[in-house]
Image: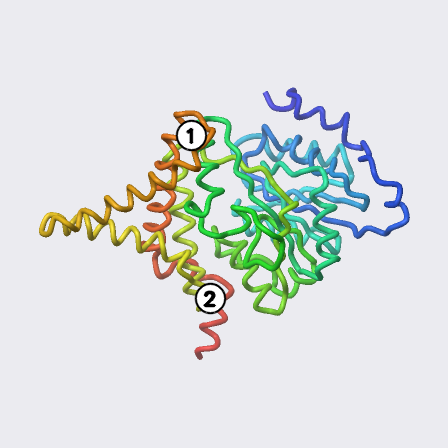
Amino acid sequence: MAGTGPDLEYRCHCHETPLLHPLDVLVTWPAVSVVMPILNEERHLAAAVRHVLAQEYPGELEVVLAVGPSTDRTREVADEVAAADPRVKVVANPTGRTPAGLNAAIAASSHSIVARVDGHAMMPADYLRVAVETLEETGADNVGGIMAAEGETPWEKAVAAAMTSKIGVGNARFHTGGEGGPADTVYLGVFQRSALDRVEGYDEAFLRAQDWEMNHRIRSTGGVVWFQPRMRVSYRPRPNVKALAKQYFHYGRWRRVVARQHKGTINLRYLAPPLAVLAILAGLVGGFFFWPAWLVPGAYAAAVLAASLPLGRGASLKTGLFIPVALATMHMAWGVGFLTSPPGLGSDSRTAQSQREDAR
């Protein structure tokens, strides 16, 4: 039962001070607000907050939890954590939607730097320190790092291999890694509050792709989004084929919304999955009339199998067999989502409203 497990040993650790370098006392580090949208996180919430407050960051920290209408004891646990440590506060997120929760938490936060952290994020101990150093060194408005997919089961390990490969996700550095520098978007993000104020926060109509969409607005208003590979956050992939397909279906569906609302943001990386879906369908149907058309889906299957071999090197046989399934699921689900995205999806967004006003 919640309230008796190890996670709620939080009170025993909440005021521990991280070990700091002696020079830190000579430097004024800016205060950081960590905002967390929370829903149905009874089991992990206390440990997640404890992990954030244990960051090796020399400056002041606060944590703002935006709690949605959970079906478990998440709100009670959040209130207990806040009562145990004055650095933690709780605000309501009545819709339960991620962008609304983020906006509510940002509005309730106090500091000049705002870090987005998810309920299951496993950050390295120097995550916030590296982020703030990078903000100051580069003058960027937002810095973020790698969404490091790591699995435990053979299926999760296969998905992790697919999600960290170019054949799986294209050249997105926040998935595959690479050199630091300006980027279209990054995972999570540590922001200058002035940038969030300038673009008026997250667009709450975007139930998915809200990070990409807001980072686009930051860049469109002259800001810089910076990829910092030292900011590596562990991520647990979806546990089965159905959950992975649902995730990527919605990714594709909402990326189409971004493309409609922000003209010129689409490129071959995003068009490849829907084009592959159309080509495979045409090949499967056309093969009944002209058999060589069946070579198209066959060529796709052969390419996925060939790409899976190096990704599975050193993995178990079961993980290796799952990798092509994970790749195909990601490609096809994303493509179908993109192709079937309803024209009215996201029509209540801030961008669409602005476009309608401009057209009058």
Question: Residue visible at 64% across and 66% down?
Answer: 198
- The label number, if any, that marks residue 91 in the structure image: none
Residue that numbered label 1 is attached to: 155
Dot 1: element: helix
Quarter assignment of residue 316: top left
User: Where is residue 346 shown, x and y percent of the image?
Assistant: 43, 59
Q: Residue at left 61%, top 24%?
A: 2
Residue 35 coordinates in the image, percent (x, y): 65, 46
Residue in view at x 48 percent, y 36 percent: 237
Q: How is the image coloured?
A: rainbow
Q: Position of residue 139 (x, y in %)?
A: 71, 62
Marks 1 & 2, CB-CB < 8 Å contact: no
Q: Which corner quadrant holds the C terminus?
A: bottom left
**Residue 182, image quadrant:** bottom right
Q: Nearer the viewer, residue 146 or 31?
A: 146
**Closer mark to the observer between disc 1 and disc 2:** 1
* Side of 201 relative to 61 (left or right): left
Identity, as a three-letter code, of the amino acid under mark 1: Trp
Check disc 2 and report the residue beneath it.
Answer: 262
- In whole angstroms, how far apart are the C-alphas of marks 1 and 2? 36 Å
- Residue at horizontal 64%, vertical 56%? 142
